[in-house]
């Protein structure tokens, strides 16, 4: 089973890029973020023609998340992140696929900081931590995948001081990501590639793609039962260099057999 996350940065504008990548990479499950499309504008027909069922929560101008499943229909369990009934931004969707509970998340950017947007980012990550703890305690196979909008450590960004004041690098943001890992979740790509940067995002500005001036902000966090089944993980970096590409690249993990996941267990990565 191959599970990927991809901040598509406008699903309709990048639809050709998405379909080309789906045909080449053949992921079984894809978590999409930043759809930038209302529910009715989601390209469900084109995605179905590519062989994928889909569930999504759209938003016209910003945000929006989706889960695609090859030759299957995701069974939705959540369409928003619990904890704030007044939060209507489309940033979280959760579905069961082939015995695995999969969440696609698009955490708030938080800029400018300090300010209300940064406060919302931290509160949202606190809610994610609370919900993740409940999923962990349930002992079911879970993947929380998406754009966390956090650069976890200095190793996860190219050498630069230009981002020092950005919300993605602030101690409060990093601490909240660390709290997720402290619950026991396994950062699959970093676990398998501890000595490589594994960037997932290259800003369009200042020639950052050409200079490989990247950040690692897209992650797949696995519950203990699934971490025992990981066979490979990586970043499809070349996708970022294609014409009309998103500023993110797809990130993926492969599992030996999700159906063999057991409740609980100890991570072996």
Image (tube, rainbow, N blue to C red):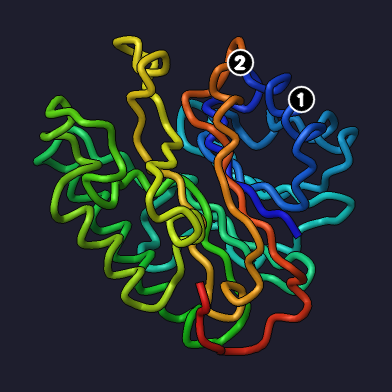
Q: Are marks 2 and 1 in contact (CB under 8 Å)?
A: yes
Q: Can you give x and y, in whole percent of width and height, for residue 204 in the image?
A: 39, 15
Question: Residue 231: which disc?
Answer: none
Q: Residue at x 42, y 32 (%)?
A: 201
Let me know if residue 158 appears in the view: yes
Q: Can you give x and y, in whole percent of width and height, for residue 253 in the image?
A: 62, 55
Give the mark, 2 or 1, whose residue is nearer the N terminus.
1
Q: Residue at x 57, y 65 (%)?
A: 143
Closer-to-camera residue (138/179): 179
Label 2 packing within 10 angstroms: few (<14), some (14-19), many (20+): few
Which structural element holds mark 2? loop
Q: Is residue 157 left or right of residue 269?
A: left
Which structural element holds mark 1? helix
Q: Residue at x 47, y 24 (%)?
A: 247
Let me know if residue 35 appears in the view: no
Q: Is residue 22 left or right of residue 102?
A: right
Quarter of the image for residue 169 reads: top left
Q: How far is the residue under mark 2 from the one under mark 1? A: 10 Å
Q: Residue at x 61, y 10 (%)?
A: 243
Closer-to-camera residue (224/121): 224
Label 1 packing within 10 angstroms: few (<14), some (14-19), many (20+): few
Q: Can you give x and y, in whole percent of width and height, for residue 177 in the image?
A: 30, 60
Tally of marks? 2
Where is mark 1, residue-wise? Answer: 20
Q: Can you give x and y, in whole percent of width and height, for residue 13 in the image?
A: 62, 17
Q: Locate the N terminus by quadrant.
A: bottom right
Where is mark 2, residue-wise? Answer: 242
- Is residue 200 depicted above or below 41 in this figure? below
Quarter of the image for residue 149 reads: top left
- Is residue 195 depicted above or below 81 in this figure? above
């Amino acid at each position: 089973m191959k599970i990927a996350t991809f901040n598509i940065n406008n699903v309709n504008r990048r639809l050709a890029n998405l379909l080309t990548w789906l045909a080449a990479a053949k992921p079984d499950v894809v978590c999409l973020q930043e759809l930038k499309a209302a529910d009715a504008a989601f390209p469900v027909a084109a995605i179905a023609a590519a062989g994928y069922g889909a569930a999504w929560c759209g938003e016209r101008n910003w945000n929006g998340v989706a889960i695609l499943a090859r030759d299957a229909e995701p069974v939705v369990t959540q369409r928003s992140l619990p904890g704030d009934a007044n939060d209507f931004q489309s940033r979280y969707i959760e579905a069961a696929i082939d015995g695995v509970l999969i969440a696609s998340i698009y955490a708030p950017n938080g800029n400018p900081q300090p300010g209300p947007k940064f406060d919302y980012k931290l509160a949202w990550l606190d809610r994610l931590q609370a919900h993740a703890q409940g999923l962990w305690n349930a002992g079911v196979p879970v993947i929380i995948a998406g754009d966390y909008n956090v650069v976890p450590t200095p190793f996860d960004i190219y050498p630069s001081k230009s981002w020092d004041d950005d919300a993605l690098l602030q101690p409060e943001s990093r601490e909240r990501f660390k709290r997720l890992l402290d619950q026991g979740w396994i950062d699959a790509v970093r676990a398998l590639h501890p000595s490589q940067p594994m960037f997932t995002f290259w800003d369009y500005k200042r020639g950052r793609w050409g200079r490989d001036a990247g950040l690692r902000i897209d992650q797949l966090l696995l519950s203990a039962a699934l971490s025992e089944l990981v066979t490979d993980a990586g970043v499809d970096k070349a996708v970022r260099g294609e014409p009309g590409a998103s500023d993110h690249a797809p990130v993926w993990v492969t599992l030996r057999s999700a159906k063999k996941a057991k409740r609980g267990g100890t991570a072996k990565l």
